[in-house]
Image (cartoon, grey):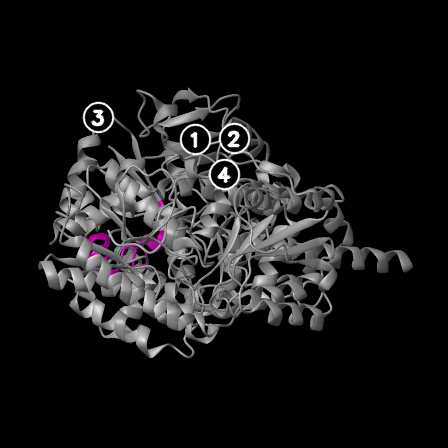
């Protein structure tokens, strides 16, 4: 299993998904050798973790979410990706295994190098494509080529949603028969039950204000601007509400400017990137969680919200909307409808009550173990 | 013996359009979606009329002509009749000509196909009166037998309906109520004086309504001779077999290519081949057969879903909330004496609105999802509650203007 990051040193959903899936596969009797590019402390895993480069990196590893438009870091990211391929090939020669399972473009060169050297079958697991990361504009041709070569040469491809499968077919010209959809899962046990206090939220809630929450990187792909536009429409009808955006990213200034321009600064909060107990508390305090993504291959955060007892409104342009029925759903661009649904949650208490009761039950079925069953089926097709 | 009692339910709701928070106070037309969506009532009505009502009426007309012993009964919701009057008068005429044969009985129900008995017996009685007036006007008929929305029933309902002067009432032949008893006899509701109870034989009814085209069903394909042989099998162990189902079974739930029309056309002939079999209307069944036992049904039953209870309309907090808010407006709405306001309030009582909010089995993509013109139960709830806010606003405006006068 070739990955790029694992918790706690993960910058997003990729590391979480790799851990959840590998753990469930191990529990079902698959022997996983998990390879990371660089030596890093990782959380206790029930499978061995190996490092392609035994040297501890002087810098922190680069985020898998860097895109060309984010500037200088990108060239070093490509260099790290290619170095990973070289090191992984050397490592693989010393190991015994039956197949290669590589996650996203960062691990594709490594996957291809090992396939070349050993002749073992390669599965590429797609959590996001270049089209998702960039919102469709200005895709990086180097990344696109690495992806396309990988999808073409892989023996089978796994995508995290039907929507991602469609992108592989339409944008990369991959034959549909070669692509298997395995939706991500979530295990409630991974999330802290106890939440750390966020004092400000306590006083806000005590004063009878509602909280509508966004959690994610502030990038084009995640649609924070649509969240703000909907917030503006809501505030014209319902004033006792705060909109909270937890996360950071290249759009931060643009989003703050938009908030100022719309004159709603006193109702929008930017606590920055949160994790652990603070994030849990934020989920628990919120009355509604929103995923307004423009293009979301899967989108795990709404499921985290449901586990923490907060109902969700999700973009129809997300993979998670394929598996979560008990959610409010909108097209990301339809901020009128988004505002309409937010207002309904704020005004009619039986709506969030029904949503959270039903979605809490539903989310229990979306476990990593059922995803691992499907991955095992894919392994057996090789 | 046995006699066959056929009753077909004919109802089309007025589906709410997507009614947003921003429409409150501006737009008072809740049911006028004219888009290509399934919330466009005229579009659905026209489609079902062409696929189901007209071809099925033509078959029934032929059967009534060829078999003088054939009889059938209908229950039309008032909102259905009203839509035909306004938009499709030729479909109404085709039903009228069936009724004119004298061998088609019309049953009584609430005009607005509502759950009013659960919330307001007075409102329930008003809607029965409105329905009777409509049926009298369109068919010159005076129904004697009552069937409540979706066969919702309990002892109290039977008692109340008896007090309104009906001689019979229909209900679902639920297993846990009947126990060892058969639905193929006439019963007396617990605590009543003379009203009689007819129970749906749900196995035989559902063989046609639900299983007819199911390839997984061991009895597939269902032919008229096979079905007639099952009816003949009741001989000696029952007096009247009640087949109750939605009229849309023919051509809409079961499409023409399933062979449902051929089945319907040949089925009366097959039944009447056996000299002991006959057809009766609900009134005739009630007049002809004696009460064989009393049935005590304190809790509500219905013909919906496998649960056959109220959970399709009152299964989650949204549904309770929506119904509670709606009926809490009763005295205020009626006090306005504003016809269009009262009519809109009553149209919001159509049971389908609450059925669309049902979250039971929603994630499994079952029948609730199939019949839901809204994308999700949550969107159904949102449009409903928003429309209700507008109605409230209209009530307060109407009330304040009355005061100034």
- Residue in the foreground of this view, choosing between B167 and B394: B394
Query: Residue B144, position in %: x, y?
Result: 49, 40
Q: Of helix, strand and loop, which one carries label 1? A: strand
Residue, x 47% and y 37% (percent of image)?
B311
Instruction: Looking at the image, tell me whether mark 2 or mark 4 is earlier in sequence order.
Output: 2
A286 relative to A116 in the view: left or right: right
- Residue in the foreground of this view, choosing between B282 and A37: A37
Q: Report the residue that reaches farthest toward the left.
A: A119
Q: Which mark is residue B158?
A: 2
Q: CA distance from mark 3 to mark 2?
A: 28 Å
A93 falls in the magenta region: no
Tag 1 and tag 2, C-beta contact below 8 Å: yes
Would residue B108 be visible to someone looking at this image? no
State the extent of the magenta-drawn residues as a range.
Answer: B245-264
Q: Of helix, strand and loop, which one carries label 3? A: loop
Would residue B105 be visible to someone looking at this image? yes
Q: Are marks 1 and 2 on the same chain?
A: yes
Q: Nearer the viewer, mark 2 or mark 4?
A: 4
Q: Which mark is residue A343?
A: none
């Amino acid at each position: 299993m070739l990955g790029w990051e694992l918790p706690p040193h993960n910058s997003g959903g990729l590391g979480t998904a790799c851990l959840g899936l590998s753990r469930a596969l191990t529990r079902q009797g698959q022997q996983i050798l998990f390879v990371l590019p660089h030596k890093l402390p990782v959380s206790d895993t029930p499978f061995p973790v190996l490092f392609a480069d035994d040297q501890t990196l002087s810098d922190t590893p680069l985020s898998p979410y860097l895109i060309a438009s984010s500037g200088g870091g990108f060239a070093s990211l490509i260099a790290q990706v290619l170095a990973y391929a070289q090191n992984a090939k050397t490592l693989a020669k010393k190991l015994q295994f039956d197949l290669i399972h590589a996650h996203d473009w960062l691990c594709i060169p490594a996957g291809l190098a090992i396939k070349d050297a050993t002749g073992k079958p390669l599965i590429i697991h797609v959590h996001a494509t270049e089209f998702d990361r960039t919102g469709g504009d200005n895709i990086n041709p180097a990344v696109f080529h690495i992806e396309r070569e990988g999808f073409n040469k892989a023996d089978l491809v796994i995508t995290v949603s039907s929507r991602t499968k469609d992108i592989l077919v339409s944008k990369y010209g991959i034959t549909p028969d070669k692509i298997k959809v395995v939706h991500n899962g979530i295990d409630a046990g991974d999330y802290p039950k106890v939440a750390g206090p966020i004092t400000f939220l306590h006083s806000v809630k005590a004063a009878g204000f509602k909280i509508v929450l966004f959690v994610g990187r502030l990038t084009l792909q995640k649609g924070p601007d649509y969240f703000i536009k909907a917030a503006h429409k809501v505030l014209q009808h319902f004033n006792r509400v705060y909109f909270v955006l937890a996360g950071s990213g290249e759009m931060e200034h643009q989003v703050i400017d938009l908030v100022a321009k719309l004159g709603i600064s006193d109702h929008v909060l930017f606590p920055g990137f949160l994790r652990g107990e603070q994030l849990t508390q934020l989920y628990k305090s919120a009355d509604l969680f929103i995923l307004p993504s423009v293009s979301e291959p899967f989108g795990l955060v709404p499921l985290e919200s449901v586990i923490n007892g907060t109902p969700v409104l999700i973009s129809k342009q997300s993979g998670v909307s394929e598996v979560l029925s008990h959610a409010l759903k909108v097209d990301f661009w339809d901020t009128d409808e988004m505002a309409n649904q937010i207002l309904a949650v704020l005004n009619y208490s039986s709506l969030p009550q029904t949503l959270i009761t039903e979605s809490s039950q539903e989310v229990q079925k979306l476990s990593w173990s059922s995803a691992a069953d499907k991955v095992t089926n894919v392994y057996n097709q090789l | 013996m046995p006699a066959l009692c056929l009753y077909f339910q004919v109802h089309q709701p007025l589906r709410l359009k997507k009614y947003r928070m921003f429409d409150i106070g501006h737009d008072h037309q809740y049911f006028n979606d004219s888009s290509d969506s399934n919330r466009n009532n005229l579009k659905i009505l026209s489609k079902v009329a062409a696929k189901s009502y007209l071809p099925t009426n033509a078959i029934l007309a032929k059967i009534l002509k060829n078999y003088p012993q054939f009889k059938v009964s209908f229950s039309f919701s008032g909102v259905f009749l009203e839509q035909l009057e306004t938009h499709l008068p030729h479909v109404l005429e085709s039903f009228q000509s069936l009724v004119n044969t004298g061998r088609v009985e019309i049953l009584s129900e609430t005009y607005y196909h509502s759950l009013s008995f659960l919330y307001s017996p007075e409102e329930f009685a008003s809607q029965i009166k409105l329905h009777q007036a409509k049926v009298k006007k369109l068919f010159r008929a005076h129904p004697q037998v009552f069937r409540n929305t979706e066969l919702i029933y309990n002892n109290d309902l039977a008692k109340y309906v008896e007090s309104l002067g009906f001689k019979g009432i229909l209900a679902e032949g639920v297993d846990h109520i009947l126990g060892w008893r058969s639905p193929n006899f006439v019963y007396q509701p617990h605590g009543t004086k003379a009203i009689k109870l007819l129970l749906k034989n749900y196995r035989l009814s559902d063989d046609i309504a639900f299983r007819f085209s199911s390839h997984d069903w061991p009895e597939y394909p269902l032919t008229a001779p096979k079905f007639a042989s099952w009816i003949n099998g009741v001989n000696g162990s029952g007096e009247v077999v009640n087949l109750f189902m939605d009229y849309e079974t023919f051509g809409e739930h079961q499409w023409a290519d399933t062979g449902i029309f051929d089945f319907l056309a040949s089925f009366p002939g097959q039944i009447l081949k056996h000299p002991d079999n006959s057809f009766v209307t609900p009134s005739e069944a009630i007049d002809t057969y004696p009460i064989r036992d009393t049935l005590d049904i304190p809790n509500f039953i219905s013909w919906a879903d496998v649960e056959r209870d109220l959970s399709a309309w009152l299964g989650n907090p949204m549904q309770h909330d929506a119904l509670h808010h709606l009926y809490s407006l009763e005295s205020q709405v009626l006090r306005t004496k504003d016809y269009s306001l009262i009519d809109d309030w009553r149209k919001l009582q159509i049971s389908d609105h609450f059925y669309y909010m049902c979250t039971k089995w929603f994630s499994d993509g079952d029948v609730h999802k199939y019949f839901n013109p809204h994308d999700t139960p949550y969107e159904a709830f949102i449009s409903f509650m928003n429309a209700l806010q507008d109605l409230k606003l209209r009530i307060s405006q109407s009330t304040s203007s009355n005061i100034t006068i």
